[in-house]
Amino acid sequence: MNSDPLVLAKGLTKRFGDLVAVDDIDFEVRAGEAFGFLGPNGAGKSSTMKMIGATSPVTDGYLEVLGMDPESQGTLIRDRLGVVPQEENLDPELPIDANLMIYGRYFGLSRPVIKERIAELLEFAQLTDRAKDKVDSLSGGMKRRLTIARSLINQPDLLLLDEPTAGLDPQARHLLWDRLYRLKQQGVTLIITTHYMDEAEQLCDRLVVMDKGKIVAEGSPAALIQEHSPREVVEARFPAGVQEGIIDRLEGIGARLEALPDRALLYTDDGDHVAAEIHARGLQPETILTRRSTLEDVFLKLTGRTLVD
Amino acid sequence: MTTVRHAATYFESRARAYRHQWRGSAIASFLNPVMFLAAMGIGLGQLVDRQVGEAVIESVAYVTFLAPGLMATTAMQTGASDSSWPVLAGIKWLRTYHGVLTTPLTVGGLVLGHVGFATVRALFVAAIYAVVATLFGALELGGALLAILPAGLTGMAFAAAVMGYSSHLSKDIGLVNLFRYGITPMFLFSGAFFPITQLPGFIQPVAIITPTWHGVELTRAAALGTAPAWNPALHVLVLLAFVVVGVLVARRKMQERLVS
């Protein structure tokens, strides 16, 4: 068993003119893990993914993918990668199976091998009965599943998923998560970018939190939450226009207070106590909700901003 | 070598895609020569021949003069069309090129494969023209078949040059303008319908720098067994130059846009 990391980055930097999209980041991805890049849009996640995918030159720093140099061995690297891009690029005028056949041929696979894999992959993507339909006729969730099926045609060592569930409805997201979870169980190494903290929590063994091109935290979802946020959060929502006036009266109730435009977040290890204290101070929130801390709270603590603006 | 293998792979993918779309274009490829040769060649041609006698244009009937010109210019339009909207769609609208480039394929392979398939399409369209022109009695079969090759080369020159052009565009107005101010005037004024000696003297050099004129000259010479305006090798070289420059420009610009 080879224990070298599948991806190794040191001081990795990407600049577009004056814009620094990825700013001197270090990380490594090991075989068999699901590794995430969590951050808001524009944090540099997609730029990082494109460099790993050997479709975007590294501006500065060191990057090694599957033990190879993306600059000089891009073709060999891409031969062993599966890529699910953020923006769809299926051929809409071709049937589903033709899309997969053409893509498989790009990897130099023989027609019989591709045919066999198409049958398996359509089964996996739950699109078997749509094989002859044009891609145009598929829903967003189906297209995304087809794109994932397509990315698996070469049985990749490493699967790159850039915002795999962005824009999908909840049902389609859950179906997709289930498929990705199966891949993970089969030992496929996944790299996922997302700005959804629930997705990162569901899928990632380990993740880095990115903001403005930099990595601001790293660890497993549970460890990140434990390290950066108290166990519980009380969300108190006040009638419009009221919160500004009373926000200082919430000070000191929990371990930390965050005032969002539409609600106040009170971080604590004892939610019930905090809720009781709010009422004891004579404050009347419209709604009050106690929940577990999430990666969203970690991100808020680290950057002062929410993930989805 | 890798680039050639990638080009072959991409060529195959276009051929595979075309299997799902060929019907419409095949019917057009057949109707187009029938309509043009009937209207311009026979209808207009008989008037031309009656007015001035058959000996005026290269000592042949007008329809015979016209048919190879249309063969070359139709191949030109095929090459230009295949490298216009489809290329911008691959780069920008459907983003299919982005998908291609996440596989082992390279930009160079994609460009060569694309131009290669467009060339085959141009050859195919020219071949239909050759058959129809023969059925119309406009050309002898042997000459018509030989003329398929220079017509295909004309298509190839346009496939490459227009791909180089399209790779710089971000909006399709640039393509509309290409056809409006480039392809259509070249179709009309580069020797397909009448010899460019009919043009005012100061415009003739403009016709000579278009790849269309060289393609028409070569195709007509092959079809009629006559000598073209220049040494045939020079005509071929001009067309090949458009191929090479077009491919290099397209590869550089697409590398810059798609692998950034």
Image: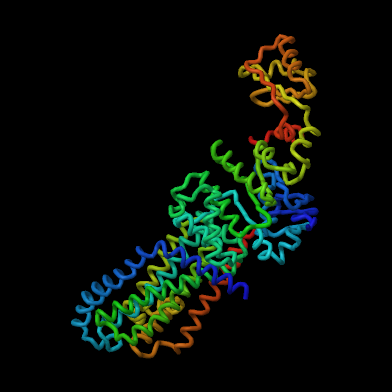
Q: Quadrant of residue B27?
A: bottom left
Image spot of residue A97 (x, y percent): 48, 57
Q: Residue at x 41, y 62 (%)?
A: B20
Image spot of residue B40 (x, y percent): 26, 74
Compared to residue B169, the image places residue B223 above or below, namely below
Compared to residue A279, the image places residue A214 above or below, namely below
Callout count: 0
Image spot of residue A178 (x, y percent): 60, 42
Q: Residue at x 42, y 60 (%)?
A: B176
- The foreground one among B23 and B194 is B23
Q: Residue at x 68, y 65 (%)?
A: A76
Compared to residue A56, the image places residue B72 above or below, namely below
The answer to whether A200 appears left or right of A95 in the picture is right
Furthest residue in direction left, as rendered? B50
- The foreground one among B123 and B182 is B123
> Which of the image's four quarters has the N terminus of chain B?
bottom right
The answer to whether B234 appears left or right of A4 in the picture is left
Residue B23 appears in the picture as rendered: yes
Image spot of residue B257 (x, y percent): 60, 59
The scheme the figure's colours follow is: rainbow
> Which of the image's four quarters has the C terminus of chain B?
bottom right
- The foreground one among A175 and B136 is A175
Residue B257 appears in the picture as rendered: no
The answer to whether A271 appears left or right of B135 in the picture is right
